Each structure stands twice: as C-alpha cells, then as structure tokens.
Image: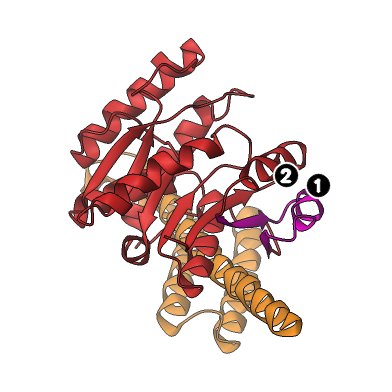
Amino acid sequence: MENVYIIIPAWNEAKRIGQVLNDLSAYNYRVVVVDDGSTDQTFTIASQYPKVTVLHHLTNRGQGAALATGTAYALSQQAEIVVHFDADGQMLSSEIKRLIEPLIKDSSLDLVLGSKFLQDNIIPWFKRYFLLQPALLLQRLSTGLPLTDVHNGFRALRANTARVIKINQEGMAHASEIVSQIKRLGLHYQEVPVTVVYHEFGQGMSGGFKIIRDLIIRKIVK
Amino acid sequence: MILQIIASVFVVYALIKVWSRYRDRTLSWYEGVLWSLAWLAIAVIFWQPELASNLAVRLGIGRGADLIIYAAIICLVYIFFRLYVRVDRMDRTITKIVREITLHDEEKRRDNHS
C-alpha cells in the first residue's frame, strides 16, 4: 500500500518537530505537517524537509481543525490510509506500522486506534488516575464504546472512513467527537498497543474541562 | 424625578441606536421590535414603579425590585447564550475559510512547481 498519509498537526512545536520528521524520514510514508498558525519556527523547520508537505493555517484554529485540514488534503491526493500523528514526539514512528497493518490485512476494518493502556507506559500517576481514568469512564458512559484508552490521537483510518468521519471540533474535543462518530456510524475498529513518551504533562484539569465544555456546547449548538 | 429623567434620556439614546441598527440591517425587524419593547418597558418601570410591584405580587414574587432583578438575569443569560452561539458559528466559519485558503495555497504551490 503506497498511499499512506501521516497527518501531523503542529502548533509551536519548533523544539520537537525536527526530530519527529527525522524519525519519519526512515519510512516510505507521505508526511503532511499542518502548521496551525505557529508563532515560532515550526513552519520554517518543517519546510526544510523536501519530502514533507507543509500546509499552513494563517491563524491558530486548534488541533481538530488542523487534523481536518490535513485529512482533507490527504483525501484530495487519493490517500488510501490516513494516520493521525502528534508533533510533540509523544508517539513513535516505528509503531505506525502496527496501526496500518490490521487495515491492510482485514478489509472489514474501518480504523485502528492506538491505546496506551494495552501496554506498559510510564504515565504520571495524577494524569493516570485523576484525569485519564475518569475521562475514560465518561467516554464509556457517553458513547457506550468499550475502548481501553481515551484521547489517544494515534489512529489510522481507511480513506472511506476518513471521508465519513467529520471533525467539527476545532480544539482537543475532536478526539471524543471521533469516538462518538465511530459508535454512531457503526464503524469497525481495532485497538492496538502503542507507546506514549511524555515530555510534558500535556493536558491538565483545565484542558479536560474545556473539552467537556466544547462537547456540551456543540450538542446544543448544531 | 432626576433619576427618571436620566433613565429616559438613556432609553431614548438606546432606542435611537436600536433603530439605526435596524436601518443598517444589523438587526432583523423582530429583534428591533423586541429591543424597542424592552427599552420602553424599562422607561415605563422608571416612571411607574408600582406597575412592577403589582406584576410582582401577581406572579407571587413579592417585591417589584426582585421581579426586575429576576427578569434582568433571565435576559442577560439569554443574551449571553445568543452571543455564545454567534461566536461559535463565527469560529467555525473562520476555520472553514482558513482551511480553504490553506488548501488553495498548496494547490497553487504544486501548480507552480509542476
């Protein structure tokens, strides 16, 4: 399968984007960085990689919006599989294969989701027990999907799946929105274990509340 | 008396603003009517406060001043919600425009290179 597109939304990731792109250059994927209106050198650094397509948002619109732009671009280029990947070095490019292989082998699968809880990962205890576990419970209650992980942005979608999943949430709530759509559209998914390398704490309590607020607002405002 | 006059001047100013917004099509006709009625009601209550008290007694609230505060809170929450909805829609529109520009720029760049 040739047309595997890796979509990397990046906002002010000048410190790490170079390393992420270096790692990815060892593989034969088509890499698309969506610079989401960064005010640092993210765009300049990403543009130094001739094989990488760098899209540029004029202004910061959020991770969900950047993913949707990258996905739209990949689909316009006849992508067969679209992989969502982070720019901060949390995910390992060597594990992309793990996500796309099930899609190649099993044609009934629509998407593959990464799960950091299916293997041993070093996760800050506060994040694990006070943020991720409650969020996972909330996700199970609201969607009814028995997923093992919450807000894991590492996922691989077949082109047809990427076409039907509509990312309307501009911010971080897109991850919950995608899970809701998996349930609503009855998509066939598989979870695979992935590594998460925490360089920073990531989203804290306020980030979690923001996600809940965005989800509620979009439920009211169609 | 002084307070009533100040309030009336302010209401007249607000009504002029409402009508000018209606004339430049910023407000629809029903929004114009609603805002006009709201400002006129404020003027009436300043000149005839017993009207608010009578209405409050009928609604079982007790005091006219309490009725005004309750009504004001309801109105403010409604206005806040309307504004939130509008900002949210604008946000989505901006995202669509930014996305279109991004994809268009990339297409142009590719055309120039080929």
- Name the residue tied to disc 2: A12
Q: Nearer the viewer, residue B52 or A79?
A: A79
Q: Colour scheme in the image?
A: by chain
Q: Nearer the viewer, residue B50 or A42?
A: A42
Q: Nearer the viewer, residue A198 or A140?
A: A198
Q: Position of residue B22 (x, y in %)?
A: 54, 84
Image quarter of residue B6? bottom right
**A160 is higher (above) or lower (below) than A26:** below
Asked if labels 1 and 2 touch by Cβ distance under 8 angstroms, the answer is yes
Q: Which chain did the renderer colour red?
A: A
Name the kind of residue labelled 2 in the image: Asn
Disc 2 chain ID = A
Q: Nearer the viewer, residue B114 or B95?
A: B114
Mark 2 vs 1, N-terminal side: 2
User: Which region of the structure is painted magenta?
Assistant: A29-56
Q: Position of residue A135 (x, y in %)?
A: 35, 28
Image quarter of residue A157? bottom left
Query: Is A50 contained in the magenta span?
Result: yes
Quarter of the picture containing the C terminus of chain A is bottom left
Quarter of the picture containing the N terminus of chain A is bottom left
Dot 2 surroundings within 10 Å: few (below 14), some, or many (20 or more)?
some
Please state if A48 lies on the left or on the right of A17 as rendered: right
Q: Position of residue A19 (x, y in %)?
A: 71, 38
Element under disc 2: loop
Q: Which chain did the renderer colour orange?
A: B
- Name the residue tied to disc 1: A40
Please state if A111 lies on the left or on the right of A129 as rendered: left
Name the kind of residue labelled 1 in the image: Asp
Q: Is residue A166 visible?
A: yes
Dot 1 surroundings within 10 Å: few (below 14), some, or many (20 or more)?
few
